[in-house]
Image (cartoon, rainbow, N blue to C red):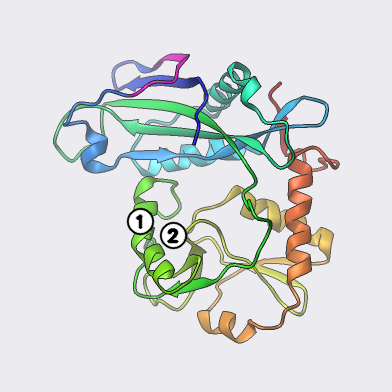
Amino acid sequence: MHFTDHMAVATWTAADGWHDSAIVPYAHFSLDPATAVLHYAQAVFEGLKAYRHADGTVWTFRSDRNAERMVRSAQRLALPVLPPEDFLCSIDELVAAEVAWVPTAPEQSLYLRPFMFATEAFLGVRPAKRVTYCCIASPAGSYFASGVMPISIWISTLYSRSAPGGTGAAKCGGNYAASLLPQQEAFDHGCDQVMFADAAEHCWLEELGGMNVYLITTDNELITPELTGSILEGVTRDSILTLAPEFGLTPVERRIGIDELLDGIGSGESGETTLAIRQRLQDIQYGRTDDKYGWLRRVL
C-alpha cells in the first residue's frame, strides 16, 4: 500500500484546546512507551474517499456525515471533539496538496483515513490530556477488485462485536480488534466474512465484520437491523436506505432474527436489485449521474 507525500495533523491539549494544525510531510510518529493509546486504546478513526470526475474536478461523498460520526466516536471514547468544519478543512487541504495522487482510472479513488489518538505519556485510567489528530491518504482501486461476486458468510454466535452500552456505535480500533478472531474462525471454515449476532441473546443479526447487513424480501422490502447503540451507523447504510425507493423497495429498520434470515435464504430474487443500488451509488460518487440528494462536496 502506498501513502501520499503529506498528512494533515493537529494537536489538542487540555490547557490550549486544538492548535498547530498543518499539512506536513508524511512521517513516523515518535511515541513514549507510556503513551496512553498503547495501553488504554483511546483512539477513533474514519474512512472516506475523494473521487475524480470526468471533468477533472475532485469531490468527496457525504464527508459531512463522516465528520459528524467522528464527533460521536470521540465523545464515546472521552476524546476531544474535532469540530466538523475543522475535520472537513483538513480533508480539503490534504486533497489539495495531493491532488496529483487522486486516480483518473475508472472505479479508483483516493482513500482518506482521519484518526485521533491519545498521546499523553502516563499510566492511569483517565482520559488523556494530550491528543493528536492526523489524516493520511492512499490511492485505492475498486473495492471489488475482481468484480462484484457473492461472498460466503459465517454466522458467529460465540463471539460478539460489541454489547449494549459498549462502543459498537463508535468507529474505534477496539471494535475491529474484537472482530479479528471470529473473522479468522470464518476463514478457517472456508467463509469470506463473519456476521455477528447480538451479545445478549445471540439470535438477532447485527452486522458483518466490515459492513452493515441488508435483506431484500419477496414483498419488496429492504430490511436492515435497527440501530441500537451496538451497530456502527454506516454512511453507505444510510445512502442505500435512501436510494431503495428508487428501485421499488420499501426501506425498513427493525430487528432481524437469525432464523428469519436462514428461512429466507435461497429465493435468489435479490441479486439484480442489490447490484443496481450499488451501481447507482457509485454513479453518484463518480459524477456519472445527477446528485439530487446533495451528497457530493466539491474539494477542487
**Which disc number belongs to residue 230?**
2
Mark-to-mark CA distance, 2 and 1: 7 Å
Q: Residue at x 65, y 28 (%)?
A: 102
Percent x, y of residue 274 = 73, 64
Q: Is residue 55 left or right of residue 192?
A: right
Label 1 environment density (alpha carbons within 10 Å; few <14, some 14–19, many ≥20):
few
The secondary element bearing badge 1 is classed as loop
Tell me which secondary structure the magenta stretch mostly adopts: strand
**Mark 2 and 1 residues: CB-CB less than 8 Å, in contact?**
yes
Q: Give the quarter of the image for residue 40.
A: top left
The secondary element bearing badge 2 is classed as loop
Percent x, y of residue 279 = 77, 53
Label 2 environment density (alpha carbons within 10 Å; few <14, some 14–19, many ≥20):
many
Q: Please state the extent of the stretch shown in magenta in the rendering.
A: 19-28
Please, what is the three-letter code of the amino acid marked with disc 1? Gly
**Which disc number belongs to residue 204?**
none
Between 73 and 188, the one lying in front of the other is 188
User: Label 1: which residue?
Assistant: 166
Between 34 and 123, the one lying in front of the other is 34
Between 133 and 151, the one lying in front of the other is 151
Q: Residue furthest front?
A: 146
Q: Residue at x 74, y 70 (%)?
A: 271
Q: Is residue 141 left or right of residue 158?
A: right
Percent x, y of residue 136 = 48, 28
Q: Residue furthest right?
A: 290
Q: Is residue 132 left or right of residue 120?
A: right
Q: Residue at x 40, y 40 (%)?
A: 44
* Depicted 26 relative to depicted 77: above or below: above
**Residue 26 falls within the magenta-colored stretch:** yes
